[in-house]
Amino acid sequence: MEGEHFAIDHQGLSLILLEDWGLPQLFLDALNLSLEPETTETTRIARFASQLIFARQIARYCLADDGYKAYLLTDLTIQASRHNLAEAALIDFVGQVIEEWHEWGKLIEVHTDIQQSIPVVSCEEAILSGLDLLLIDDDAVMLTRLSNQLTDAGHRVGTCCNSEAALQYVIERQPQMVIINGNMKPGDGLVLCKMLRISDFGKNLYFIMYGATESEDALVEALDAGIDAYLTKPVSLRVLLAHIRAGHRIVVLKQELEKESRDIQHYTAELATANRRLRIMANTDILTSLPNRRYALERLAQEWATAQRCKLPMCVLMLDLDHFKSVNDTFGHGVGDQVLTHIAKLMKEASRANDIVCRLGGEEFLIIAPNTDGSVALLLAERIRISIEKNQYKGLVQHQLITVSIGVAGSVGDKPGWNELMKLADQALYCVKHRSRNRVQLATI
Ligand code: GH3
Ligand code: MG
Ligand code: MG
């Protein structure tokens, strides 16, 4: 299209511009060569060109979303091994490139949050762009003739003269279709086909076999071994090309199906993450980030059941801030919120790792203390009370100290139940509030 309208395409234009800007000829030649189908040359320019191809592949990988990355990785790993880069080193290197690219993006104000997904190639487009074929025949004349004919028909053709070489080729180059002479060493082609069919990369290959035999048994054996189409010799090029086109449609459909399945996996993973986030949100108090009432009650029931099963003591602490209303009345609700967050942090810091600090609502908190008897729970409560008294929120000028009242209740054996335990801690708290405030009290059963 570019060529039709402007008599030059963007690649040709880039080369002219680079030349105009004084890029040395060696670089221009390598760049030019890197835009051609890959060669097996080993000249300095060809090696440089192959590095540019590799760099382009890395760039594509860096821009890809997770699904496309998985799709590109196999090819990238093969390329990396050609450049003596092991897979682990490649992953490290690519990670570093992505990181630096984001940093550069910030510096030069270029958006780097690009996520390209696998380009969908329609059947027609794919057929027009030709296939990567592997041709296997021990007859060198046949191999050359067919290979030339298929190349002329627009395909990229690799050739092998035995099944060992073919196996190696398939593993390294992953062609889309294999065309094999069924009359090489007896059974050779079928063994190769069976072997590839059980591998991940071989199961999607399209196999065409041609051979001299016309027997029904041989045909059935070939199809059972995983061959997709069988042609009898002499092979008509027209019929072979028609089979390749039919096979190509299947190859493309399989690729599309695989992409869909990868997309589904991707969305399922995203959904699972979203569900987990939702679950966390449903159990978390938005102001203090502590577990909320819903979580507190569920967890209390669980911890109580564990304590019963393991015959361990456990305690709960009910905490209520003293005269908190006056903070809101004096400084406003916003400051009140900040004080609540500050105190939640103090409670968490003064508790042990196993204690579960929750916000029940308003200025009321609950701490579940597993494997803790009453005397230890009283020490914990006192530590929290003192911490809140000592570490006042800065900014409450000329306000009475913010303090907390705490009721503690414990259970040993199966009495009292977890409901009762909460009620007892609440009653102990009520007693503190009525007698004085800024105290802790253990409930009596
Ligand atoms: P007492 O010592 O008897 O517990 O007195 P108090 O003022 O703490 O208790 P009361 O139950 O009368 O008032 C609790 C106050 O807590 C009322 C409300 O303004 C405040 N409060 C409850 N939830 C929030 C909140 O999410 N943010 C803020 N800023 N204040 C809250
Ligand atoms: Mg209250
Ligand atoms: Mg209160």
Image: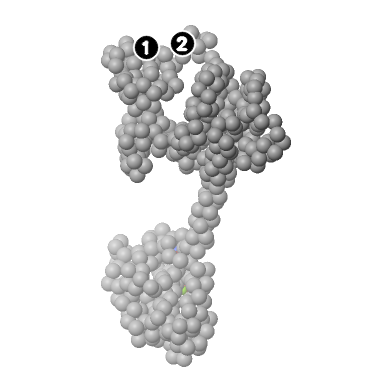
Give whichever of 44, 116 is nearer the camera.
44
Residue hosting label 1? 16
Residue shown at the point (59%, 32%) measured from the top left: 182
Q: For this rendering, which residue is in front, 332 or 61? A: 61
Residue at position x 27%, y 15% from top?
24
| Figure quadrant of residue 331 | bottom left
Of helix, strand and loop, which one carries label 2? loop
The reply to whether discs 2 and 1 touch (Cβ–Cβ < 8 Å) is: yes
User: Furthest-top residue in view?
Assistant: 7
Residue at horizontal 35 percent and vertical 86 percent from the top:
375
Q: In this view of the protein, which residue sits in the foreground, 440 or 334?
A: 440
Left or right, 206 with respect to 29, comes to right
Residue 318 location, quadrant: bottom left
Residue 70 at least partly seen: yes
Q: Which element is circle 1 on?
A: helix
Mark identifier at residue 8: 2
